[in-house]
Structures are given as structure tokens and as C-alpha cells.
Image (cartoon, rainbow, N blue to C red):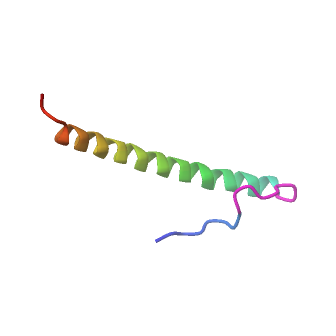
């Protein structure tokens, strides 16, 4: 289930956004980056294992 932590759009004008809101946005984005990095690491390991499994024997 996806939770919406805050309402913002990537690339939107930040002129009227408060310091507190900017800090909150950074926290949300940093958390998402960490989540994506974990998934990327997992998928890279799975791919590596599959490549080893299906590698041609010479």
C-alpha cells in the first residue's frame, strides 16, 4: 500500500514553500532514494545470480 506523506510535485516552483516544508520534502525524498537503492541492490544481485546460472560453460 502506498502512503502519501506530503503533497508536492517534482520540479515545481519552490519560492513559496517554507523551510519546514522543504525539510519535510527532503526527508521524504531521501527515504524514497534509500528504498530505491535497496531494491536496485536486490535486483542487481538477482540478475547476477541468473547470469551465473545461465552462463554458457566453455
Q: Quadrant of residue 12?
A: bottom right
Q: Nearer the viewer, residue 9 or 2?
A: 9
* Res. 25 image quadrant: bottom right
The span picked out in magenta is 9-17
> Which image quarter holds the C terminus?
top left
Q: Position of residue 6 (x, y in %)?
A: 66, 66
Magenta stretch, overall SS: loop
Q: Residue 54: x, y in percent?
A: 18, 42
Q: Residue furthest top?
A: 58
In the picture, measured across the screen, residue 19 lies left or right of residue 55, that is: right
Does 54 appear above or below 16? above
Does residue 30 belong to the magenta stretch?
Answer: no
Task: Name the outermost residue toward the bottom.
Answer: 1
Picture coordinates of residue 7, whole percent (x, y):
69, 67
- Relative side of 54 to 41, left or right: left
Could you tell me how many numbered marks the image carries? 0
- Indicate left or right for 10 with 56 as reference: right
Q: Is residue 37 above or below residue 58?
A: below
Residue 5 x, y percent position in the rendering: 61, 66
The one nearer the camera, 56 or 14, is: 56
The residue located at (21%, 37%) in the rendering is 52
x 82%, y 57%: residue: 13
Q: Residue furthest right?
A: 15
* Residue for point 75% across, 58% down: 21
Amino acid at each position: 500500500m502506498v502512503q502519501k506523506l506530503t503533497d508536492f510535485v517534482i520540479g515545481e516552483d519552490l519560492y513559496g514553500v517554507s523551510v519546514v516544508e522543504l525539510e519535510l520534502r527532503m526527508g521524504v525524498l531521501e527515504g524514497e532514494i534509500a528504498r530505491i537503492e535497496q531494491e536496485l541492490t536486490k535486483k542487481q544481485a538477482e540478475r547476477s545470480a541468473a547470469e551465473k546460472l545461465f552462463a554458457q560453460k566453455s
